[in-house]
Every structure is written in structure tokens, then in C-alpha cells.
Image: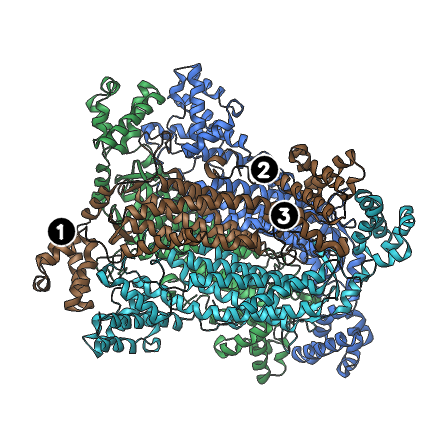
Chain colours: A brown, B cyan, C green, D blue
């Protein structure tokens, strides 16, 4: 991760997973652990407060920690050592209680969980912002005709509101998924060397309960040092979310093509310029989101591969998570922020949407024509007739309506009014409005149930 | 996917995603669609039954369909064509109603959902089988001492029951996840060309509702042709599940190493032999599960990458799902079956577990010694003392207890009884029993809540 | 892999990695091994021929082998058993020499290498076909103006020949890469149980040399059972190739959009139809290639992950290759075939290319204007002036030339002839021709050096 | 990427891809471009030197560049702007020539290539260091018996030198691969807006040639903005290399298990300690390498996925490379450094290797027994006999030799001397020495050919 590229790729939650935060997460665990011991009576209250007083990342020397980490193999060892030295210098009694009963992974994993708790709050807010922008677009574009496109070809007419509702529908599912995984993810990690809390003897569970209370994290059934489905589930969720955002950005960038020009990212001075082409307004948010969508699957795969961890605490798999999960979090949240902003300020050009339909020479209404004719001719014959007319129109550069009118069966079965209806760009397509309503209603239900 | 390797890699759900099933899924959709039209009144009941009568995969020629698919670009087109020809030959009226209002993707996606419904039932059963085997192991091995190992080194003692409980804990979370995603996954796909049900005019929603009822699939808020988070969520779930299984298999294979020999896959005549080494009993199930765990992350990444689909229906992304998702389903289910069977019949050697502890020269009790001494010397000093003794013991080939007894502080603070307790392999480690109980209780709760 | 979808996704090399071929590969190894022993004198010539006579896949029962593989854990064990039984029934002396000195992995890996040898021949032919089609397109479209597009926006003019040359340039590099990896990949695997040829005592190397000669495969420095970079390198090559093909297909599909319409896949009766939209001609080859490009990265990642194999022969990693590598081979070769056919028969519409330039209101010439003005005003001022004019033209719906002419500095520094030159669609862009020539020359050099 | 974890995960090439280097790469391009223009005569020599004088990363404000990048969408735009402002303040004439004829991607890609040139030098050195360490191990351990293990089980005896030779063999292939891809990777990128050098008119190629000379980079056949196989090939190479290193680290960590204890990473004070277990010496290098091996496949997959870039310059794909490729470079180089150091200082315990063979009760010699008996009984019967004896020995806790001696056929066909030979741990296994020699010879050839 480059700091230079952070405001571009990771505008949301800056600092949330920075090195300072990483250290502080460990120290928050250590402070809470000391206090938990104090509550249980396995550490004097005074000592606990002394320890907690030194649990501040700004007191430690990052560069020295980095060097020591290279020797120790994890960050918690030098952080705990530095804390120990600090406390020892102050209070030779208190120092006995530093890190008592814990192992490095307890501190690192719980520290991560604390960072993830803040992260998920940010994510929820941006998800809501995106959902709300899409709901507005769905609502206000119920009758905005636009080409429906399949296989990158104009296919049949739809409305822009339904396109927005499609994105909204997916985003709403993501909101539900996030709510479901949250309680599985945000739990304490505390098991000592091999997950037995062995060095605390009979008091382990009590200390664990107090520690969980102190950190406002639920106490899980048991430690999960080697069972990584909790963080991995977050990774897969972020992969799904980024996939949906990538689809949204792909669509937006396709609509913004010079030759299509139906929708654009919000403009801003200096945004998306080119070092050589003065006319350019590059879709920066789409680029960022698509980059995230290209990167997330590989990062998710890494987290899944890394689940195969050995015995009580593994070798290499856990280490592979340390940078990968934060990176994935930040890329996904960055993509979400860009997506929400783009949908908030999207510029639509309904006139171009109509023009693009019109410029297709009526071909986009072929399905409508065929299904109308099918009532008389049967589906197969109607399909063949319209296909024939469509080919003739394409090669002859004529309108599909004209080509259809050359067909005897058309003249026989369809009146001019029928044809007007078939080729009417303002005829609302089938169930589009009903679908939009259903999606909006589901969103309202979710909001009301909160 | 090789048929030769199918019984090895994909023992669960054979045929569930075979070519026959793929065709039948499409035909089930078509039959139900005709009947739905009949109920709504947009197709004569007689015609619907005629259509349904021909919706049998065995009536169609697979080889011809394969060739036609290469031209058409998807399987539904030739299946619908073949069905149309069959129906036409029987009833020139009924043929009008074949595939009415639908697009290829409606049939293919819904067909897939129907296969997935059967698949999930299989998965649930095998999850339960695995969970139940692990619960039994956790229960019956509460006091079976075994080395806890971290970074592939002996670390501190634990019990085998806690190892089993760790796996069980993860498996139980998977059961909950599967129950949560099920209703999002198993829904109808029906939107016509561009997701508007445009060719059905005002009757679209009614037909959709009847179709959903016919197939016993909920009607989603709107079609999801281009929004692939539903199937992708299943893929990520299978990735998580396979990760957990991979961890289980890795652990089992490590325990089964010649030099460790603490646990083994169930033996069977001819199982895991070698073409050249007569003594070998290779852990076949572990190999299969680890292979699945190596393959799943890449397949999940593919499904996530493929989520970036264009507009109403995309180009290439959807096509990338067709083989990838079934493959992932079968590999994950195969790994689950192997995992369940291995846990059902696992052979434990508690004697070797004790021997391996014993052969470590007491080093595994270093943490216990240090935490006991820390009460007197403080954590830092105690850690340093025991580390010193441990190194001396390692290099001198002596027992840690002997090396400790050479330390003055040890002789001063610890009695022989204290040392007996520290080095007692039968002392139950800390909170292990409590953790096991908590995991078992959670499982019972889930079962009771069903 | 579905047989139904094979002609679509895997048109090249059908059967090359089928189950029959998989068995035959093992048997080819066994036959050659017997003959090698005969040459060295460690097996009677008669016995070797008896063995070889039974090394025919069609003599074995696939279904029985599949079931036995599920027990044994690999395919070679039951194949060798079946072969042994056959030979034993014929000649109780010859049977002693079956599989002598080999391990299962020797037979399976060498069998794979034999299949890969055929595969690479197919790949080379299709690479040449694609290269030749692209060379023709580059040559014949040196002066065919088309919009150069960046970030999916019209940017500056280029020629279609340069686009073709860009693809060609990459394809030529792939041809070189394939030639480089070939000798590393196509080598014998023969090491016995742990890669020492231990059971052959002093004769191991001799037998290995004769075996290599028999199979016309070089003898590598040593066996590579656990070192998987050889097959993994092929996988990464196929990933790179598929990436290039994906780019080609993406470009083609974007050019084929209804609103752009500059290039199309070759048309064929019934190709790319729609089950509901009679006018559709879907780009089937692009879909197939893009699907392969979405699938290949995950499969490559699997092969790379699986390289971490334990000791002399690993657990799970090797097994993960068995289906993944053939699948990747077939998908890549299928994509190459589709790409070659599409480029062979591509339909270009140079008129639409010009129209699309024209319809952009001259914006595409903004860089040309700015660089011309920069000679007088400096780059910064010129860029700012043209940017201002471009915005005014965009918002006012006027041509960029008109907007420029409103600028005093333009009127001062540029004549009408200057402006004609700037906005001349037929002015050949810079070094395009030179670049095309360089690429074509490199191709000729490679062909001549063969 | 976390700075805190950099010394652990990325000890090689610190700073090589840092933000400062990223900026300097762009500026090196700009300085060279100005000088190239001066040589061609399209820029005054004085102006070029003025521009070059300001091409120093330390003159620019990183934080401001980061913010501006978020607006502009790439780093080159603000870097060029800042450079332009600096030059303008000094020399209003020189400013005209800044970035002349180039596009942002020219500067960014060429800047990257310059960084990669330094990187590859580092990589070559560390590859040589690893190769040399492995060659020494192979040479000095020709007759060091160790258990050959397959499927994580003792299989048959080998020598440690052959294990080292296996790694060496792969590392040598990597050295060749790197030499092959180097000239494809380290080339200039210079094409202007759409790869035509359009704004330089007829002088484009000349400027490009001088620019290439200035930077000591070959001029490729044509620009490769949208064709990403060059950097992607490096990514795949790094994936292969990391796979090999992962295998090496996996093997090392397995050998270092408490119960096996045959080989260890070099010890160092404070290295691989535990925060709670005083006796631990965790294999830090193995953890780092295995983490890299878990991360590389996903990063490679990202780079492959990102190859599908649109038209002349793509949207999102290129952006996905910016952080992914440097990260992969650093992780792979870090793993290589750890691997080289571990092999340089590996601690072997040949006594434990023998003990572990001995403790297996002779089972490891089963293949030797069977192949010896096969000469008399035929392979099938011999295999069955030894299998029977091996099972009896395993279940009865007796030595395989004793169990064999219970078999009449053994007593009949094998003398005591025969059995002594079969069970002789010091008998050199087959072709091991020959294989070691072949690998060492190949290495010498490569070194001599340099």
C-alpha cells in the first residue's frame, strides 16, 4: 500500500488500519487484560492502572518495533517487551501482570477485532449512503426509458430506475449479510499459548469474561487461534461487496463512453484530466472501483488459502492475513465510498438515452414485435419472421418497422396502431415498475426493522 | 472434471450437476412456466400439459445439444429449440406457449437453483454428520492429553477433546451461515430479455408468482440476471467451508506422520496403498480434502471476478460461472464427505500422544513453569529463567525439570510437589473443559432451535 | 468440465485430456518402461513386448478404475493392477517386470507430459494462425482511421492496423515464451518411490536413459516429483496467453457494441442468436474468450498454491493439479481457437469508424490542437486554452474547431490550413506506420529463424 | 503494506518501490525525455538541462501529490504539474518542453521499469546466494541418510544431499527463466496519448530512440500501454519462484518439528521467541516464506485478471497493477532473502535423521525388501508378502525384519547378508549420487556460460 495512492484508492477510513492503529490495538488488549485481572482479583487494581497508563501507541518507537518484529516474528512480542520495560521502570510490582495469561496472537487478533469494529461502522454508513442514493435514482427514474443491453448489445427497452433498483437490490442484500456476520466477527480472542488459558489455571474463564466486558466484545465459545473462518468470512463478504460495486462501475463506465454518453460521474474541477488530452474527463471513480474489483478476488483467495493453519496456531497462514485483510478492507471501503459518491452525484442524460434507442433503427423493439406476432403466428414463426425482417433492415439500412411492414403476415395481423404501440419508446416495459416497488419496499422494511 | 477421478474427489452428490441434470433443470423451468401460464390463463391448460410432458432430459440428444450450444452460445437455446420441435410435432397449438416470456438465462439460472436446492440438502446432511462426529470426539476426549503445537513445534499441553471442539465450533458456524444464505440463494430467476418481463405486458408479475409457486421457489424482489451476489455468496461459503476442512485435514495428516502417529484415518482394505511401497497406508481423505482446499480459493476468486457483468446481462462473466460453480460445489461437498467419514472413523492413539509429550524432555511444560515462577519472580524474570534452563536442557540433552532444579530461584520458590504439578501430563489444562462444554452447548442449542 | 459445454468452451484438442488419454498416458509409460528394461537387460525382450501389448486403454474398464482410484488415492495404482492381472493371465514370467522400479507418480506425471506434448503442438499451430491473421490485419489497415480510446473515452485518432499490431506484438512474445518453456516442460519423470530410483540399484540411470529415449523425452537432471515449477510454468504461460486473448476479446466486444459498430465477429447462420430477441447476433467467441480470461487466473493461482508440496512427494498439492492443469490447458486452447477464428474472419466497418470520429464533434483532435498551439504558447497555456474550448464546445453542442476559432490566440497563431490539418481524419498519426512495420519485421525474423 | 512489518516480510530491496522511488521513476523519465528532445533538436539543450535539474523527488511535496492524485486519477499528472510549475518559475521558455509528446502512462510505466531494473539485480544476487548455499548442501550431504517421505509418511531412504539438489534444480531453472524474461520486461514505454506518438508528428521514433538510449532501455517494437504481458510475465515468474520457496520452507518447517528435529533455521538471539513459552524457537523465516507463498498466488491472479484492459489504455486494470506488482516483488524478494539466509545457515542433525529411520521399525525398507524379493517371486507376490509382514509388524510392534523372517519365502530366498543389505541405512540409494552430480554440473554450466 502506497501512501501516495491512499487518498485515491482508500479514501474511507484513513488511518484505521495504519501502523499506529495496529500497535494501539495490541495495547488496548493489554490494558483491558490488566483491568480484567484486577476485577477478578488476580492483579492489584493499582498495577492494572499503571499498566493501562502506558498502553499508548505514541509512547513506543515504531522504527524500533519494526526491527524487533523482524527478529521476533510478530509485532506483539516487541510491543509487550517495550510495554514491560516502561512499566518496569515505573513500578516493579505492576510489571508482573503485563500480558498475564495471554499469548501474542490473543493481543494481535483482538487488536484486529477492535479495528474491525470501527471499520464496520464506517462500512455500514457508506452502505446506507449508497443504498439511499440508489433508492432515490430508482424512485425518480421509473419512467426514464433506456436501452436494456445484453452481451453488450442493445436488446430491449427498460427504464433507468430498474437499473438502479437492480444495484439497490444487491446492496440491500449486502446490508443484511453484514448484519449477520457482525456478531460472528466481533468477538474476543483470548486463549493463551495453545487456547486452553492454561497458565491461568482455574481462573481463565473468569478473566476472559471480564476482559470481554472491558472491551465490549462478546466472549466466544472458545478461542479461535487456528480456526480462521471468522476473519475469512469478512474477507468473503468484502469480495462480494466489491463484486457488486465493480458491476456498478463497469455499467457506469460503459454508459459514459463517448459514443453512448447516457450517464457520467459527477464532474469536479481538475477531476479525471489527462496529461496530454485537454478534452478528457476520465471516470476516476469507475477506475478506482474497477481496480478494487480486480484486486479483491485475489486477496480473498489468499485469505481462504491461509485458512489451512496447523494445529493450535499455524505457520505462515496467520502471517499471510496480517497485511492482506486490512488491505482488502480498505480497498473495499474505498470502492464503496467512490461508488456512493458516484451514485449520489451521477449525471444522467435522458435525452441521449432516447437518442440511442432511436438510432438503433427500431431493432430494440424486435422482441416486442415478435411477442405480439406470436399471439397470431406462434412463437417460432413469429421469431423467424422478425429475425428475417431484422436482418433485412440491418443490411439495407432501413428501420425495423419498415422492414416488418414489407411482410405480408405483419400487414395482415398488425394495425398501424399496433405497430405504434410496439415501437413506442414511452410504453412502460412490463413489470419494471412493480419490480422497482418491491425493491424499495424491501429497503423500507429493513430500515424500519432496525 | 474427470469421470475417472469423480469417485475420489466428488463422492457426494454424484450426478447432481451432471449434463443430464443441467438439461433437466432447464426443462423443469420450461414445464413449470407453461403451467404457470395456464394458471394465469395465458396458455390453455391442455397445451401446458403437452409441453410439460416433453420436458424430460432423456428425450433429448445430448451430443446434438452440445454441438448446437457451440453455435448458439448457451445451452437453453438448443434445449428450447428441441423442445419446441417435439411439441410442434405433437400439437401445433401448444407450441406457441413454449418458453413464453422467458429468456435463456431465466431457464439456465432457475435450472441451476433447482440443482442447488438438492445440493444444499446433501450439504446440510454431511455438515450434521461431521458436526456430530466432532461432538462425540470432543465429549469423549475431554481428558486425553496431547501436545498443543504452535508454529509446528510442541508448545504446551492440551487435550484432544479441545482440538475436536475447535473444529466443531467452526463447523457449527458454517451450519448457521448456510441457513442464512439459503433463502437468498434459492429463489426464482424470471425476467425475460432484459429483466422487465416486457413481452408479458401487464401479466408478468402474475405469471412470475405462479411460476415461483409451481417450482416452490420464492419470488425475489426482482430478477438478478446481472447481479450475481446470490450464487457468488454460495461460492464464498463453500470457500470458507473448504478452508475449515483443509485445516482439519492438515491437522490430521500432521498427526498421522510416521514420527508422530497420534491419529489416523480409518483403515480399509486396499485404501491408500502404494504401487511400490508395501508398508504405506496413505491418508487418502486428507489428500482429497487438501486438494479441495487448494482448489477452492481459485474457484471462488473466479466467481468473484465474474461478478462484474455488464448491463442487463453480461458477456463472459456469466459464462465463467457455468462450470466453475458446480465444480466448486462438488469439490466442497466431496471434501465434506471425506472429512465426515474421517472424523467418524478416526483412529486415535492416546498412548503415542503421551509418549510424544514425554519424549520432548519436559520442554512443553516450560510455560507452566514460567507462569508458576512469575507469581514469585515477575513475568520477565521468570520467562528469562525458564528460557535459560530450556536452552541448557536442549543443548545438554537433559530434562527441563532437571535443568530447572539447577536454578537457585527454582529451588527457592518451588517445592518438589510444585514441580510434580507443573510436569504432570494429567493436569487438565486451564479452561479446556469449560471451552468444550460451551461449544457442545451451542451445538445443542442450534439443534433444539431447528 | 461439462461435455455439453465442451464444443463451446473447448473446441481445440477435444479428447486430448479425456479419461481415455489419461489412462493411455500411464500405459504408454509402462510400455516404454518395460522396453527400457529390456534394452538394459533387466527384463527379457519377450516379456517387455508382452507387457507393451496390453498397454492399451481400451482393454481396461474405466468405471472399475474410477471406483478403485477412490480407494487407492491415485489412478496409476489400479491401472498398474489391471495391467498386471492382464499380463499375469498371459505370461506369468512377464508379470514380474510390470512397473519395475517406478512409482505411481512416475507414470502419472510422464503420462501427463506425453499429453502436454501433443497439446503444445496444437497450441503452436493456433498461435501461428492467430499471429498470421493479426499480421494480415495490421498490414491491410495501416491507413484505416479509428478512434483511439483511453479510459473507455475517445482520446486521439489512431489506425486499426496499429490496434492489430498491438495484439500481434503480444502474441509474438507468447510464441517466444512457449518455445523457451517447452524444453523445461517436456521431460521424463522417473524416480521411483522417493526420487532415488532406489529399487533399481546401480542400473537406475541406465534404465532412465533408455526410458527417455523410448518416449523421445529428454532425461532431466533429476526427478521432479515434489518440485512443480515445470508444470506450473506452463500454467502461468497459459494465464498470460489467456490474458492477452481476453484483452483482444474485450476490445472486439466493445467495438461491436450497437452504438459503436466498428468491428464484428464473423457471422454464421444460427450463431449467437437469442431465445427471445430475434434481432440479436451475440458475440459468442468474445463471450467464450472472456469467460476463459475470467477463469484462468483462479486456476493459475491454484497451481501456484499447489506448488508447496511436502518432502519427496506431497499430500494434496499434487492431487490439486490433476484436474486443474488439463482444464486450464483446454480453456486456454479453446480461447485461442476462438480468438484465431474471430481474427481470421473479423468484419470491419471502416465507415462507422470514421462516423464515430466525426460524431465526436472534433474533440478527439484536442491533443493535436494543443500540441500544435504549444509550439507557440507553451504546453501549459495551450493545454488550458484547448481545455477551455473543449468544455465550451461540449456544453454548447458545437464543434471543437468552432470553439477554437472563438479564441483569439488560435486566430492569431493558426491558419485555416493549420486547422484543416489538425482536424484531418486522414492525417496518419505519428509513428503508427513505423510501429506496425517494426512489429511485422519482428514476426518475420521469428519465422525465418525457425 | 505496513512499515512495521516491512523488515520482517520485505527485508530485501527496502525503499526500492517506496513512494519516493515511485515519484523519482516518473521524474527520471521526464528528465530523459527532455534530453532526448534536445538531442533530436526538438528542445533547446539549455531547456532540457533546466528541466532535468528539477527532476528530483525531494523537491516535491508528497502529501500534496497524494491529494492531487486522488483528483487526477494518476500520479503522473500532479508530478508533471508540479515539475511544470517549478520549471516555469525558473525559465518560461523551458517549460514548453516538459512532458513533450508523452502521456501519463509513459512516465508511470517507464518509471516502474526503471525500478524493476534495480529490483531484478537484487533478485539475481539473492537467487545466486540461494543456489550457492543449496549447491554446498547437496555437495556435502551426498551420503547423509534421511527418511524420504511421501504423503507425509516415511517412505524409503534417501540422502539429504538429494533433497538439497531438488531445491537447487528448481532454483537453477528460475535463474534461467529470469534471464529469459529480463529483455522482454526491461524496455521503454513511450507512445503518447494512444500509442502513436501522434503529437510528435514525424519525429516520434527519433525521440523514442534517443529516450531509450538516455535511459539505457531497449526500444520495443511498439508501445505496450494496453498489452500487459510484459509486467504480468514478471508477476508469474515471481509466483513460480515463491512457490518453490514455499516448498523449501514447508519442508524445513516439517523437518524442524519437535518430534522430527532433523533440520533447523539458523538460531539467533531473540529470534523466534514466544511471548508466553520460554522454550520456543519459532521458525521465523519459514513463517515469512510460507506467508509469501500464501499471498503470491492471489496477487498473480490479480495481475492476470487485470490484463484485460480496454482499447489503447484501459480502465481499472492498469490501476490494479500499481500497488499489486510492487507488493508481489517485495514479498517474493523477501521470501528469497529469507530462504537464502535459512539455507546458508541451516543446522542439520544427521544423528536425528538416522534415529528417525531407526525408530520406524524398519518399515522404511519395505520397498527394498519387496524389490529384492520380486526378483524371485515376481512383483505382485513380493509386494503382497511384504505388505502382509509390514502390517503384522505394525500391529505387533515388531521390526519389519523380524516379521519378514517369519515368512517362509523370505527364509527361502534371502540370506542374512541379503537382509543386512536391505536394512542397511548406509547403503546409498540408487541413483541419488548421479542425480546430485547432474544437478551440480548443470549449475556449473550456467555459471560458466555467463
Q: Residue placed at 57% from the left, 68% from the top?
A: C107
Cβ atoms at labels 1 and 3 below 8 Å apart: no
Q: Residues within 10 Å of mark 2 (few under 14, many from 20)?
A: few
Q: Quadrant location of residue A220?
A: bottom right
For marks 1 and 3, the one nearer the N-term is 3
Q: Are marks 1 and 2 on the same chain?
A: no
Q: Is residue C203 depicted above or below C389 in this figure?
A: below
**Disc 1 versus disc 2: distance between alpha carbons?**
63 Å
Q: Chain of mark 2?
A: D
Residue B4 position, x and y percent, is 50, 72
Between the residue at mark 3 and the residue at mark 2, the CA separation in whole angstroms equals 40 Å
Helix, strand or loop at label 3? It is: helix
Residue count near mark 1 (Cα–Cα under 10 Å), binned few <14, some 14–19, many ≥20: some
Please give the residue where the numbered disc 3 appears in the rendered image.
A110
Q: Which mark is residue A398?
A: 1
Reading the image, the residue beneath label 2 is: D121
Q: Secondary structure at mark 2?
A: helix
Above or below, D373 relative to D155: below
Residue placed most toward the observer, A369 or C421: A369
Residue shown at 40%/26% (left/top)? D99
Most foreground residue, D279 or D310: D279
Residue B68 in view here: no
> Of discs 1 and 3, which sits in the foreground?
3
In x, y percent, where is residue A382? 17, 65
Disc 3 with disc 2 on a shared chain: no
Left or right of B239: which side holds A416? left
| Horizontal and vertical percent position of residue A100 | 74, 47
- In the rendered image, is residue B105 in sight? yes
Q: Secondary structure at mark 1?
A: loop
The reply to whether dot 1 and dot 2 touch (C-beta < 8 Å) is no
Amino acid at each position: 500500500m502506497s501512501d501516495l495512492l491512499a487518498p485515491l484508492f482508500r479514501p474511507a477510513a484513513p488511518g484505521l488500519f495504519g501502523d499506529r492503529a495496529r500497535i494501539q490495538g495490541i495495547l488496548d488488549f493489554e490494558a483491558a487484560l490488566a483491568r480484567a485481572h484486577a476485577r477478578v482479583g488476580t492483579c492489584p487494581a493499582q498495577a492494572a492502572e499503571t499498566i493501562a497508563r502506558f498502553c499508548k501507541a505514541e509512547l513506543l518507537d515504531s522504527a524500533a518495533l519494526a526491527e524487533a518484529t523482524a527478529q521476533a516474528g510478530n509485532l506483539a512480542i516487541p510491543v509487550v517487551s517495550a510495554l514491560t520495560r516502561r512499566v518496569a521502570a515505573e513500578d516493579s510490582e505492576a510489571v508482573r501482570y503485563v500480558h498475564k495469561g495471554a499469548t501474542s496472537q490473543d493481543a494481535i487478533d483482538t487488536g484486529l477485532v477492535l479495528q474491525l469494529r470501527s471499520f464496520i461502522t464506517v462500512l455500514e454508513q457508506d452502505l446506507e449512503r449508497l443504498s439511499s442514493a440508489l433508492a432515490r435514482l430508482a424512485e425518480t427514474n421509473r419512467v426514464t426509458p433506456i436501452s436494456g443491453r445484453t452481451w453488450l448489445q442493445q436488446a430491449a427497452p427498460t427504464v433507468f430506475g430498474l437499473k438502479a433498483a437492480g444495484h439497490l437490490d444487491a446492496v440491500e442484500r449486502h446490508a443484511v449479510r453484514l448484519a449477520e456476520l457482525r456478531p460472528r466477527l466481533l468477538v474476543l480472542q483470548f486463549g493463551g499459548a495453545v487456547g486452553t488459558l492454561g497458565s491461568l489455571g482455574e481462573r481463565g474463564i473468569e478473566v476472559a469474561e471480564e476482559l470481554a466486558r472491558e472491551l465490549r466484545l462478546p466472549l466466544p465459545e472458545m478461542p479461535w487461534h487456528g480456526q480462521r473462518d471468522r476473519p475469512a468470512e469478512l474477507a468473503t463478504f468484502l469480495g462480494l461487496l466489491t463484486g457488486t460495486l465493480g458491476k456498478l462501475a463497469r455499467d457506469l463506465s460503459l454508459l459514459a463512453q463517448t459514443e453512448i454518453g447516457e450517464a457520467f460521474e459527477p464532474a469536479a474541477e481538475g477531476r479525471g484530466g489527462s496529461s496530454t488530452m485537454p478534452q478528457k474527463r476520465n471516470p476516476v471513480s469507475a477506475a478506482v472501483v474497477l481496480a478494487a474489483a480486480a484486486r479483491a478476488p485475489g486477496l480473498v483467495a489468499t485469505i481462504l488459502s491461509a485458512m489451512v493453519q496447523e494445529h493450535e496456531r499455524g505457520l505462515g497462514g496467520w502471517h499471510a492475513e496480517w497485511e492482506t485483510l486490512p488491505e482488502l478492507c480498505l480497498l473495499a471501503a474505498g470502492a464503496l465510498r467512490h461508488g456512493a459518491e458516484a451514485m449520489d452525484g451521477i449525471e444522467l442524460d435522458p435525452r441521449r438515452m432516447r437518442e440511442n434507442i432511436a438510432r438503433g433503427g427500431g431493432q430494440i423493439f424486435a422482441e416486442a414485435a415478435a411477442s405480439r406476432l406470436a399471439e397470431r403466428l406462434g412463437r417460432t414463426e413469429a421469431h423467424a419472421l422478425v429475425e428475417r425482417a431484422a436482418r433485412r433492415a440491418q443490411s439495407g439500412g432501413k428501420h425495423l418497422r419498415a422492414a416488418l411492414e414489407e411482410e405480408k403476415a405483419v400487414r395482415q395481423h398488425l394495425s398501424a396502431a399496433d405497430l405504434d404501440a410496439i415501437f413506442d419508446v414511452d410504453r412502460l416495459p412490463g413489470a419494471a415498475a412493480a419490480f422497482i416497488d418491491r425493491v424499495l419496499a424491501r429497503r423500507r422494511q429493513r430500515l424500519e426493522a432496525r
